[in-house]
Image (cartoon, rainbow, N blue to C red):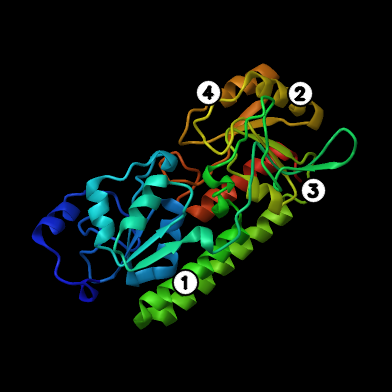
């Protein structure tokens, strides 16, 4: 939406145009870089933010994601070209605490509208365990109220102690959507009515998804599921489950031998049948644990990006696939 900005220099325009990043199809075109369209140009940090921008913005936005499909978002390093792209945009939509280089780039950018999804809902601390889990004395242990520690006393928390994986809880994601919609209305008032309508439609879709999870997981044999890294804490809390992660919030961290042994014992005690892994990181640790404990493996997608390996074409489809995987693993009827 160049009418809002001064003339872009030839050097800056060339840098942006040369970026050659993949963009989201519904509201963007491969030939137009952020800041070089007649639409409301939004740079999103990674897929869950880009999906919100697309669904809420509709035909009025041009969305570009800083994280390529298939790229692990935690590992993203912002390039000079991406910095130029960000500076020529109308808005930046990101989730502070997930991608440090994005946080820094947005903080230093002159982009007028900066939307931090982490400020649009409440964040909590999660460790290797999240949700409620009954201990051997019949009480409940809750990891969500503080730092969780492994057998060596090491804390498994994200930078700042807060878990950023809010998009995996449809209710929290809907809260973020409402905040993004209001930010779009303020930044691009000419299309405010459409943004309100699109936001309401998206919130309705997410509300329906929440109901599917609640109903689909209501009658189950076990509450406990094992994942490679602690991405599903909010989802576990929402539906009364307990996530036990092999690693902490960092998908690349290696578990201790004591943690692996603990999970093997826990799986036997709690009737766990499946160890979940994800598509964007190695499945080696999950398959090793599963093999040693005689368990199955399956995918539980943290939805940090959509690729050809994803079980669906968008957020809702992949979340529905996650629900089916959880139903099978937990013995839900």
Can residue 24 be seen from the camera position used here? no
What distance separates the C-alpha of mark 4 from that of mark 1?
Answer: 40 Å
Looking at the image, is mark 3 or mark 4 earlier in the sequence? 3
Looking at the image, is mark 2 or mark 4 earlier in the sequence? 2
For the residues labelled 2 and 4, say whether their Cβ atoms are less than 8 Å apart.
Answer: no
Residue depth check, mark 3 versus mark 4: number of the one nearer the observer: 4
Look at 50% across and 53% down and name the residue there. 315
Residue 98 at x, y percent in the picture:
47, 47
Q: Residues within 10 Å of mark 3 (few under 14, many from 20)?
A: few
Instruction: Read off the residue under disc 2.
Output: 265
- Of residues 321 and 131, the one drawn nearer to the viewer in this rendering: 131
Looking at the image, is mark 1 or mark 2 earlier in the sequence? 1
Residue 130 at x, y percent in the picture:
69, 43
Return the residue found at the far right: 137
Look at 83% across and 43% down and name the residue there. 140
- Of residues 90 and 314, the one drawn nearer to the viewer in this rendering: 90
Disc 1 secondary structure class: helix
Instruction: Read off the residue under disc 3.
Output: 219
* Residue 221 occupies quadrant: top right
Looking at the image, is mark 1 or mark 3 earlier in the sequence? 1
Looking at the image, is mark 2 or mark 3 earlier in the sequence? 3
Q: Relative to 49, is 65 on the left or the right?
A: left
- The N terminus: image quadrant: bottom left
Instruction: Read off the residue under disc 4.
Output: 284
Instruction: Read off the residue under disc 1.
Output: 181
């Amino acid at each position: 939406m160049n009418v809002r900005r001064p003339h872009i220099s030839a050097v800056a325009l060339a840098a942006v145009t040369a970026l050659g990043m993949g963009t989201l199809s519904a509201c963007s075109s491969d030939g137009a870089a952020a800041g070089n369209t007649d639409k409301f140009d939004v740079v999103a940090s990674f897929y869950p933010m880009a999906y919100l921008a697309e669904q809420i913005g509709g035909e009025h936005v041009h969305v570009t994601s800083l994280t390529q499909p298939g790229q692990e978002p935690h590992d993203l390093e912002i390039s000079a070209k991406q910095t130029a792209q960000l500076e020529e945009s109308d808005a930046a939509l990101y989730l502070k605490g997930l991608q440090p280089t994005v946080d820094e780039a947005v903080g230093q950018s002159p982009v007028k509208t900066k939307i931090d999804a982490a400020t649009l809902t409440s964040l909590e601390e999660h460790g290797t365990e999240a949700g409620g889990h009954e201990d051997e004395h019949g009480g409940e242990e809750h990891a969500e109220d503080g730092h969780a520690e492994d057998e060596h006393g090491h804390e498994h928390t994200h930078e700042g102690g807060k878990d950023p994986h809010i998009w995996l809880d449809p209710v929290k994601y809907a809260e973020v959507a409402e905040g993004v919609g209001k930010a779009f209305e303020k930044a691009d008032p000419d299309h405010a009515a459409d943004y309100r309508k699109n936001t309401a439609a998206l919130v309705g879709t997410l509300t329906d998804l929440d109901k599917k999870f609640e109903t689909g997981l209501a009658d189950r044999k076990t509450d406990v599921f094992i994942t490679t890294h602690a991405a599903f804490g909010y989802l576990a809390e929402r539906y009364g489950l307990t996530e036990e992660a092999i690693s902490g919030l960092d998908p690349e961290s290696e578990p201790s031998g004591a943690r692996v042994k603990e999970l093997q014992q826990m799986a036997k005690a709690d009737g766990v049948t499946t160890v979940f892994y994800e598509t964007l990181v190695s499945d080696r640790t999950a398959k090793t644990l599963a093999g040693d404990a005689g368990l199955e493996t399956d995918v539980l997608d943290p939805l940090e990006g959509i690729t050809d390996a994803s079980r669906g074409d968008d957020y809702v489809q992949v979340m529905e696939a996650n629900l089916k995987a959880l139903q099978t693993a937990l013995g839900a009827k």
